[in-house]
């Protein structure tokens, strides 16, 4: 099981495109757009983003006001990766600044992916 946030999500996409290994599932939170206008210029090597179906179940969690990737970008990624898309509304970058606290909803998404809930 992999849980990834932001650039970690892009790393998972690149890894999945190059490996024959498999994992149980992946929870991908706040997927940024490496070609988007707010993507940090010092974060290089993520574009082009692999756009192929993952060989494992996955969930993409998106915020409607994410600063580094649009809702449309996350929807497109979820579609080509074969991921379930979960829109949690306006939550920024879905991090400590989002005031989600312990984020029990995120834990519930993880449990759902693992089949324990």
Image (tube, rainbow, N blue to C red):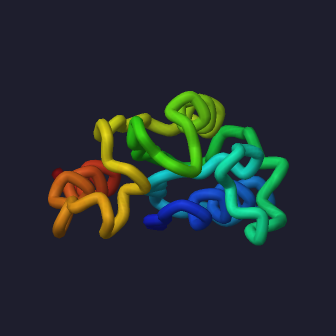
Which quadrant of the structure image shows residue 103?
bottom left
The residue at 26%/56% (across/down) is: 106
Where residue 15 appears, as percent x and y from the top left, is: 71, 63
Give the answer, above or below, for where 26 lies relative to 51: below
Picture quarter containing residue 69? top right
Q: Residue at x 50, y 38 (%)?
A: 83
Question: Relative to residue 47, is residue 16 drawn left or right?
Answer: left
Of residues 77 and 25, the one nearer the viewer is: 77
Residue 58's place in the image compared with 53, above or below, is below
- x then y, percent, for residue 32: 60, 51
| Numbered label tally | 0
Residue for point 16% across, 51% down: 117
Kindly identify the residue that appears in the image at 70 percent across and 44 percent down.
36
Tell me the quadrant of the picture where the N terminus can be found.
Answer: bottom left
Judge left or right: residue 51 versus residue 81: right
Image location (x, y in percent) of residue 74: 55, 38
- Residue 51 sits above or below residue 103 on the image: above
| Left or right of 84 in this view: 78 | right
Q: Nearer the viewer, residue 81 or 30?
A: 30
- From the viewer's perspective, is residue 80 above or below residue 36? above
């Amino acid at each position: 099981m992999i849980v990834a946030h932001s650039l970690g999500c892009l790393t998972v996409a690149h890894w999945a495109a190059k490996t024959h290994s498999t994992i149980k599932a992946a929870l991908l939170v706040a997927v940024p757009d490496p070609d988007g206008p707010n993507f940090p210029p010092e974060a290089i090597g993520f574009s082009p983003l692999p756009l192929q179906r993952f060989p494992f179940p996955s969930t993409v969690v998106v915020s409607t006001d994410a600063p580094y990737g649009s809702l449309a970008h996350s929807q497109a990624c979820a579609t080509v990766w074969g991921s379930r898309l979960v829109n949690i509304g306006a939550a920024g970058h879905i991090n400590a600044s989002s005031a989600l606290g312990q984020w029990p909803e995120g834990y519930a998404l993880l449990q759902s992916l693992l089949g324990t809930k």
